[in-house]
Image (cartoon, grey):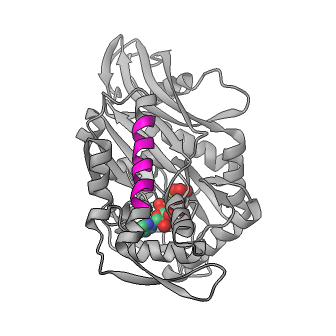
Amino acid sequence: MSSNDLIVSLDIGTSKIRVIIGEISNGAINIIGVGSADSEGIRKGAIVDIDLTVQSIRNAVDHAERMVGITIDEVYVGIAGNHIALQSNHGVVAVSNEDREIGEDDIERVLTASRVVALPPEREIIGLLPKQFFVDGLGDIQDPRGMIGVRLEVECTIITGTKAAVHNLMRCVEKAGLRISGIVLMSLASGMMALSKDEKQMGTVLADIGAGSTTLAVFEGGSLAAVSTLPIGGDYVTSDICYGLKTQTEHAEKIKLKYGCARVEDAAEDLKFKVMRVGTNVEKEFSQVDLANIIEPRMQEIFQMIRQEIKRLGYHDKINGYVLTGGTVSMPSVLPLAQIELESSVRIAVPDYIGVRDPSFSSGVGMIQWVTKYVRSRVAGASKKPAKTKAAAGASSSGKSGFVEWFKNMFKEFI
Ligand SMILES: Nc1ncnc2c1ncn2[C@@H]1O[C@H](COP(=O)(O)OP(=O)(O)OP(=O)(O)O)[C@@H](O)[C@H]1O
Ligand SMILES: [Mg+2]
């Protein structure tokens, strides 16, 4: 890797599109730029209007470009949503070298073999996670290179998504004038950023509570075991405030951000604010306690739904705790409320980099870390160039071939 590689991540969320530019200098990541724009065209985490989404992506990218003084050509795109599914598979090959020493080519062949799976016509593979390799039946091997054997097997998790959702996502990014260096499952990226090795081993749920959706990722036995997306998030809280205080969405959102508190017992009665009500031009005064009375039941419901979903997935008794991230968990008192509702150990994860210390940046920052660790270390990097000279901030390949290249690197990644 060159000394100042740039990696750009794109998180297309329901409330905001976020672009994060990471500079990799001697293996260390510096976040040198962030661009965000209000998201139009996304509902509950899914693209519902291509043109509006394209424009929002453009706005976020322009913002980041202005901040850093570069032109962004290529991005790593985050993917999430209820269309994502995981399935286990197995691959087997005979070791090809005459001396029976396992090489990179054997690993690539076994990973390719493990991708052979019957999928419904509307689904496609978007990623592959090797869990363990077996050499002549001996398992628990993370890196079989250099070992001697006849038979190489891999047990892996295949990540699939619907072709329509993947296509729409890629189409929007390309229409915004960007090349796609790779697609990254945001749950994996945030998991890498937010969870320790032990947490992933012992069973932990990462819950990303955004605006329109809550993405759950269960990590167990060191790897991603299950994913699920619930169509709930901070927008519900805002909507309750709208009805409760009889005000417009825009005002409700501002009030939530400024005075919101997730627990009535932690709210201040003497913290008062005025609200312009719909259909009148008179303002009415409310206290933070009034607001918390609206917010608390909805936040309780969100945590109950998370709990039920984990039960439905069959992991209720297998997990040791929850790690929360996503914009909604920034609200004061979310943590104690979650600890009560989830009846488990809970903590909030925030990226530890200047300029992005906010749980809503977890996915975007996680993607930069993911790419740096797994994908980029094998690809020749691009370096920072002045504005207007089209710096390729991403892998050097493009379009379809970029995608194939990325898959190849994904294979190498876990090794
Ligand atoms: N300080 C805060 N207090 C309360 N809510 C907050 C705060 N900061 C952000 N939020 C809420 O977090 C939500 C945005 O979170 P985030 O940016 O993670 O969502 P998103 O990625 O745009 O959406 P999604 O992941 O659902 O597609 C909004 O509902 C916003 O109101
Ligand atoms: Mg999000």
Range covered by the magenta-colored residues: 295-308
Toward which corner of the image does residue 99 lie, by quadrant? top left
Residue 4 seen from this side: no
The C terminus - image quarter: top left
In the rendering, at what x and y percent does residue 287 appear?
38, 77
Residue under the point 67% across and 38% down: 162
Residue under the point 52% across and 62% down: 240
Residue 386 in magenta stretch:
no
In the rendering, at what x and y percent does residue 166 appear?
66, 45
In the rendering, at what x and y percent does residue 174 appear?
70, 59
- In the image, 198: left or right of 115? left
Residue 306 in magenta stretch:
yes
Residue 287 seen from this side: yes
- In the image, 269: left or right of 294? left
Toward which corner of the image does residue 331 lie, by quadrant? bottom left
Residue 128, placed above or below residue 305 = above
Q: Nearer the viewer, residue 358 or 88?
A: 358
Q: Main secondary structure of the magenta part?
A: helix
Residue 413, placed above or below residue 9 = above
Residue under the point 39% across and 75% down: 259
